[in-house]
Image: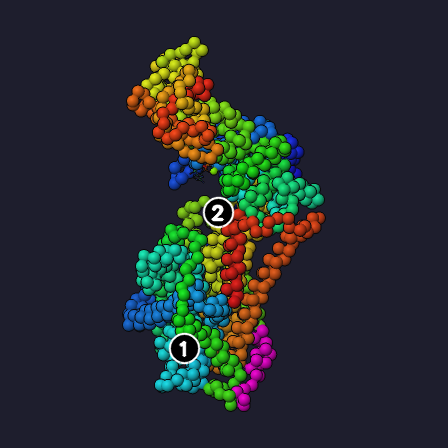
Amino acid sequence: MTTPHPTTAADGGGRLIVDGLEKHYSLDGADVPVVKGVTFTIEPGTFTSLLGPSGCGKTTTLRCVAGLETSNGGTISLDGRVLSTASSHVSPDKRDVGMVFQNYAIWPHMSVFANAVFPLQVSGSRLPKQEARKRAMEALELVQLDGYAHRPATALSGGQQQRLALARALAHRPKLLLLDEPLSNLDAKLRDTMRNELRRLQQQLGITALYVTHDQSEALSMSDRVAVMNGGRIVQEATPRELYYQPADRFVADFVGRVNMIPAVVQGRDANGDAIVSAFGTKLVTPCPAELGTGSEVTVTFRPESVRWHETAPDRPNVLPARVVRVEFLGEIVEVEVEVLDGRAVAGTLVARGAPLDSPANGSSVFIELAPPACRVLAD
Amino acid sequence: MSTAGRTTEVGRTRPTGMKIATVIAGAVIFLLLAIPLAVQVITAFRGPFLPFGVSTAKWSADNFVTLWELREDFWAVLGSTAVFVGGSTIISLLLAFGLAWVTVRTDVPFRRVISVLVVVPFIIPPIVKAQAYQLMLSPESGVLNQLLRLLPGDLVIDPYSFATMTVVQSLTNVTFPFLMIVPILTSMDGSLEESARVSGASWGQTLRRVTLPMLWPGLLGVAVLTGILGLGSLEIPLLFGQEAGKNIFALKLWNLISAGAGELPQYGLAAAWGCVFLVITTIAFVIYLRATRSAERRASISGKGFRPTIMKLGAWKVPVLVAVFVFVLLTAILPMFALLWSAITPYPIAFSFEALASQTQWGAFGEVLADPEFWASLGRTLLIAGASATIACVAATVLAYGIARGRRTGWSKGMDLFASSSVAIPAVIAGFAMFLTFLVINPVIPLAGTIVALVIAYSYRVSIAYRSGYSATLQIRKELEEAALVSGASPLEGFRRVVVPLLLPTVFAVWIQMFILGTNEFTLPAFLATPESRPLSVYMYAMISPRSAQLYQPDQGAAMALIFTLLVFAIGYGLQWAVSLRAIGRARRRLTIPGLGTRATAAVPNDPPAPATRAVAAQGLEEQRELASVAE
Ligand SMILES: Nc1ncnc2c1ncn2[C@@H]1O[C@H](COP(=O)(O)OP(=O)(O)OP(=O)(O)O)[C@@H](O)[C@H]1O
Ligand SMILES: [Mg+2]
């Protein structure tokens, strides 16, 4: 059988376009929508993460791309080739993708080598024996498992199995690499190492990668772009920095990293065009989209690490008197919870993070500074 | 749009060829079980003899009316059977539980040896066991009665009393419940008992208040299966019970259809009896299903990965060991000795060293080995057992895979239940129903009395293979198949290269188990075989039954029983050995990858395997153990 789409060289990652993807499951006769019109594009050779809370449909989206699930609507295409529409479905073995499963799915009855060479022996991209062997060994070398080739696959540690799964997914040089929480079964140290290694490999091979995770630090550190999912929809798709500093809504702000949120009302604009809002019984200056006019109820968000504390009030905007109620030492950082004071009354609480050395004492009075560029206003 | 990829209708990862195979396998199993039972029910309602092709056949409830008219007989059969089956089941279960407890939960020495010795009788054909007990209990020459005479008091066991028969039946059936209770005890979370002990309960209180309440659904399930097994076996009642046991169901059925000269056998009445007991076992099966479901629920509540706590026996070690020794003496040593003694003496004489010196002869073994019919019936035994095990394993595994992986529908749930149900059909009923079926279809498909008929009948134990295949499929995580698909394997390639190799060890183990059951089978061929198709078990019975005039040769019968037992041992071990060789061969082949050479292992060898594959590896180990215990 001839393969209609011969596998391209590894440096040819493909462009993945997912447009309006829909997927329902039927549960006890009822149709439950799980993926509701997901749209995104991954440029060739880039790394995109799907980030979202448990049950939001990340795995389902990934499995639709792999062809393991049949979608109910929308199109998926890879390098211009349509893989699925509402009415057609290319089976997984014809899609030219590689996939790493959450629990690795290493075949326990095969050796390490047999696992890696499998994709080169089956109809998807069958190669002559010698060639297949060479490529499989290359893939194992890539993940530094070439010394283990003759081992039974069950005699590998968790991290090694993870790397073998990666080698197997890359052996046939697919256009697209799919990864479903591949690091979640590893311990924290190994997870960090593998994170770097995975990213290095992806860039070295220039392969297009779609990575599913619910761990925001993983998504932020590895990806070119991150798509945040919630309830079967993509709520924001951006670079990690954009996502972190300019979250599109409260869900993203809250899900990606820690955030302080303060309800506020727009009072007017200053000379720079920044908004003046009332919050904590006082006025704050913050950048604000122009369409939010006076009287709009908004939420001011800012990250704990952009809050600074001072013993004496500096002569800058957005400085508030406060009392320290909790100081938590976390190692490289200290987390401080303060009550912002409005005269004698407590107007609200904030969390700040900073270097441990100059942390204030519990119960002391401090001045809190929220630098305007670090603030972001979200419409309610 | 590219048309390169094949377009499939639903995202099933199962080859559609598999769907067809599943349906075929389902149909085979359905026909295998449903037709004989249907024929039996129809026979019960259509006349005194055969339901079709004879002038007397017409729809009526006469047979059930007859049952009611002979209600004294009816109650006698129910009572007798209940006492016999119930009594022997309770004794077997107590013995099995005690032995399992001793081997799993105490620090008794020689635990491994004990568990092997308890399992050994499993491989002795039941008809051989029955014969051995008969010899051992013979009032004059029996070795057990001889031993009892050494004790003070005038103790002689009457081999043909109802109580003896019940006890003998229970002694022959200990291994089956033992093999089922051991895993239940092993998987029990010891911390639950420990917390009871910490709360101040004694061992006895803990057993009564915590252990037994936790175990009882599992034990109830074992009891039901042991009971159905006992209800279905003909061997002990046939050899011991012609007088005291004539009202035991298995023998009753047998006598009803082996009519005296000049009479027509009462198939209709026998079928009515069969229906009555089928209702009883169906109820028992429902109880079994409930019990196992509730046992599973309890198992899932208790945590996993705990070792059962070990009870320190202390001074009790010696009495426990003595009790175990008496058990082994009664179930393995004395029976084998009685057979041997019978084989080497020309007529029944009591054991004495004088007799050993002057009266013994080894000719019986030579005669057996020179008997062409021995070899012929042995060949038939292997053929029938092998063919039926193969049919059952293939059909059951394919169906189990299809149902375990397919969508749950009403149809698949029904089929699942049906394929699991053959454990609820006692062997005597299966044998009789098959016998009727082949008689009925004989004018169209002349199979009655042939080897083919025996192969089909033996395959009825298909649910053993089905249940194992089902759980083995569930153990193969779906991602393993999906990983093959995204690697570019077509569904069939994935099935062949990933699913089949992972299922094979289980299928082999079950095949060996069913093959040994087949070689030992007596009840089914007793109903179905003719002198031209009889397997070794039936031929051997002819040699030891005084009623089979010319063939009656008890010394040759005993010699044959010993040879038979040795053969089954050899086959069991041989197969296990072959399978393990295969496994070793595979591992070797895996180790040498051509063109790579064998590199020194560069790695830390103690890295624990990741949890995901460890489960599969553990399963493999579990199966090897099961295999070992079957072959032992
Ligand atoms: N086979 C199925 N049948 C019915 N519902 C399903 C099925 N698989 C998933 N779902 C449902 O679809 C939703 C999305 O599942 P999905 O596995 O995509 O979540 P996820 O985002 O990957 O979550 P996690 O981070 O926990 O892995 C869940 O609510 C889940 O219950
Ligand atoms: Mg998931």
The stretch in magenta equals B356-375
Q: Which residue shows up at 32% across the image and 20% down it?
A: A342
Expressed as whole percent of the image width and height from the top left, the position of residue B123 reads 50, 69
Q: Which residue shows up at 42% across the image and 71% down it?
A: B317
Q: Which mark is residue B240?
A: 1
Amino acid residing under circle 1:
Phe
Kindly indicate the quadrant of the structure image that contains residue A376.
Answer: top left
Q: Is residue B215 magenta?
A: no
Expressed as whole percent of the image width and height from the top left, the position of residue B252 reads 37, 72
**Residue B600 horizontal side relative to residue B619, left or right:** right
**Residue A373 horizontal side relative to residue B3, left or right:** left
Residue designated by label 2: B405
Which quadrant of the figure shows ligand 1?
top left
Between discs 1 and 2, the one toward the N terminus: 1
Q: Nearer the viewer, residue A44 or B471?
A: A44
Name above or below for residue A16 compared with residue A312.
below
Expressed as whole percent of the image width and height from the top left, the position of residue B299 reads 39, 54
**Residue B73 horizontal side relative to residue A227, left or right:** left
